Image (cartoon, rainbow, N blue to C red):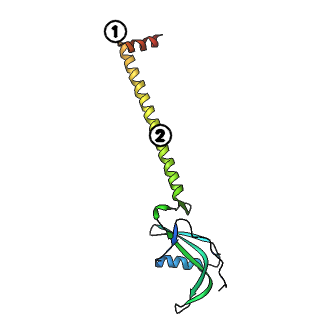
Amino acid sequence: MLGACPSDPPMPAGYRITQSVSPAIQRWAYSIVHDPHTTYGDRFEALFNNRPYVARIEHHTWTTDSQGNHVPGCYKGVTVYEPTDITHVIYNEANGKTVSSDSRRTFIELLLVGTALFSASFAVASALLRSNQSRKLVEEAHRTALRHGRKADLSAPEKAWLRNLSG
């Protein structure tokens, strides 16, 4: 027992105190609180059933004795937090960090903008390529007709275009 408890920091954003703790989470929390190297404020993250949980070493104002009775005081304890809404928190297994929904939203927006830019660039390049291929085909057809002594029946824009080619 430590005496009067100092205040702990606020709970992590997007989380609430876990109401129902599975035996696996209990074992995890027990191992954290009984680790002699943990100190107040230490934060731990883990996945249970593909859901992220945060455990933090905090001051607890009571504990239980061997008969299960509440004993008031100030004790080293672990508080386990669960997401308030799983859509607001992503657990990134690669670096063990939680990512806020704002970060995720920004990433998705950038991904969508990048995809739109790529699609627009592809459409423009594709149209230019088709236009260039069509121009080359028309040009070749007119040259072939002129080589064989046939008069090509050209529209006014085509005649202007060929004059620019010859010019």
Residue 63 placement: quadrant: bottom right
Q: Residues within 10 Å of mark 2 (few under 14, many from 20)?
A: few
Q: Residues within 10 Å of mark 1 (few under 14, many from 20)?
A: few
Distance (Cα) linking label 1 and label 2: 45 Å
* Residue in the picture at 49% in, 43% down: 114
Mark 2 residue type: Phe
Q: Along the polypeptide, which appears first: circle 1 or circle 2? A: 2
Secondary structure beneath label 2: helix
Q: Residue at x 59, y 70 (%)?
A: 10
Instruction: Say above or below: 76 vs 143.
Output: below
Residue 24: x %, y % from top left: 48, 76
Q: Which residue is mark 1?
A: 148
What residue is shown with label 2?
Answer: 118
Question: Quarter holding the N terminus?
Answer: bottom right
Specify the amino acid type for callout 1: His
Residue 143 locus on image (x, y percent): 38, 13
| Relative to 28, 36 lies left or right | right
Picture quadrant of residue 132 = top left
Residue 2, disc? none
Tell me residue 166's x, y (percent).
Answer: 46, 10
Nearer to us in this view, 13 or 68:
13
Q: Residue furthest top?
A: 149
Q: Are marks 1 and 2 in contact (CB under 8 Å)?
A: no
